[in-house]
Image: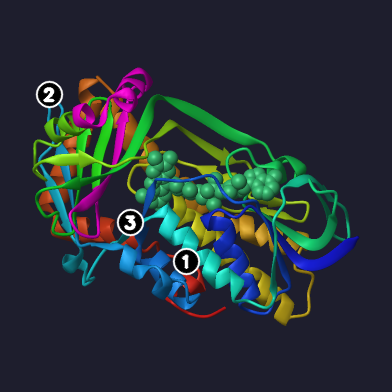
Amino acid sequence: MRKGFEVAVVGGGPAGLTAAISLAASGVETALISKAPPADNRTTALLSGSVAALEALEVWPLCRDHAARLTAIRLIDDTARLLRAPEVRFEAAEIGLEAFGHNIENRHLIAALDVRAAELPHLRRIGAAAAAIEPDDAGVTIRLDDGATLRALLVVGADGRKSLCRAAADIETEQRSYPQAALTLNLGHARAHNGISTEFHTESGPFTLVPLPGLRSSLVCVVDPAEAKHLHALDAPALSAEIERRSHSILGKIAVEDGRGLFPLGVETAQSFARNRIALVGEAAHVIPPIGAQGLNLGLRDAATIGELVVEARRDGSDVGSSALLARYDRMRRADVTSRAFAVDALNRSLLSDFLPVQGARGFGLYLLDRVAPLRRAVMREGVEPAAQPRLMRGEAL
Ligand SMILES: Cc1cc2nc3c(=O)[nH]c(=O)nc-3n(C[C@H](O)[C@H](O)[C@H](O)COP(=O)(O)OP(=O)(O)OC[C@H]3O[C@@H](n4cnc5c(N)ncnc54)[C@H](O)[C@@H]3O)c2cc1C
């Protein structure tokens, strides 16, 4: 049987769930096509705009008790190089915020999104995978792996890095891989983190501890792939001791928790974010290295933007999958995504580079941030709240 929807969202990760909720909460007839996502031990540092959006979508009250406030960020040069940067400390209070954002385990965020999605009468969840997506002039046909078929005016492709939706829209990507991998895990520690996230910059990449509620933190340790594999294979006492050593015992004794992730690092950006009645959100549109907590925050801004454009088009009585709407979506997301991918790439490369002038430039940049308060405040504001934010990120309903 063929069922018709205004929008079909493919993929039930955090970006897809947020897009589906933003649409259905505004009365758009939405299908969310997703199988239960694989277990994810990662955490996400949600910046303040993302938290505002989750508030507006009535998701935040369902998960905020699992999130830790990030009141300060420290960058520490932990290289043994000739030109080392000074320690830089960013305080949220310096730009009038209580916190830069909140760190939360993805499983708690997804559970809260699932609960909210189940409350919405205009959202239909379909527990299947999309097997084929076929756009035409009037809409999109989605064939599911259980044999069913759906129609929608617009498909929101939230199906992650290996996006079927992106291929169906005939969109290529530009990609570059780094000689690095990220080991992720959560850990308990003896000393309080006091809401401070600490990023040690090493020759192989950043080693970042981000607060979780209580005496817990999450770790993203970026190293070369062989070392990441070696660390991943250590038993819990050996890995705990190694992390305590690498963190210079700033959090005291460390005890790693069960569940470790290993992610190859790279950057991948779709050449267009929307075409042929398909709009891409989250990692289907862009993958960036886990440096500076930008990835999912960008994905949530994608979700909020497509929600805003569809609700606006619907109010005007126009086609929610029109090429004009898709071109506008692409324009609205491009600068945000490319500027952040560029900044993360530049910072990462400056860490890996053995070229003295590059190290000097990085050190000088951080020196300026440490010494020049207006510059530091401008960088903090842009990092947390980009100039052009979608309505949901400003806490407004669609
Ligand atoms: C180590 C690491 C740390 C990170 N830390 C942060 C951070 O602190 N802050 C931050 O903002 N970002 C962070 N990120 C980035 C963030 O994790 C990702 O941006 C985010 O998980 C992507 O969400 P998504 O919903 O786009 O994709 P995914 O979570 O990959 O979801 C895609 C979903 O689509 C489903 N799917 C795929 N194909 C189909 C199909 N054919 N039919 C139906 N469903 C399908 C999949 O099963 C999956 O559930 C980090 C990333 C890494 C690797």
In three-dimensional space, the C-alpha distance between marks 3 and 1, rounded to whole angstroms, equals 26 Å
Check if residue 211 falls in the magenta segment. Answer: yes
Residue placed under numbered mark 2 in the picture: 80
Q: Nearer the viewer, residue 63 or 24?
A: 63
Check if residue 317 falls in the magenta segment. Answer: no
| Disc 3 secondary structure class | helix
- The mark lying in front, picked from 3 and 1, is 1
Identified at 15% across, 30% down, the residue is 241
Contact between labelled residues 2 and 1, with CB atoms less than 8 Å apart: no
Residue 298 shows in the view: yes
Position of 2 relative to 242 (above/below): below
What amino acid is labelled 2 in the image?
Answer: Ala
Disc marking residue 112: 1
N-terminal label among 3 and 1: 1
What amino acid is labelled 1 in the image?
Answer: Ala
Q: Residues within 10 Å of mark 1 (few under 14, many from 20)?
A: some
N-terminal label among 2 and 3: 2
Q: How is the image coloured?
A: rainbow
Residue placed under numbered mark 3 in the picture: 383
Identified at 22% across, 52% down, the residue is 216
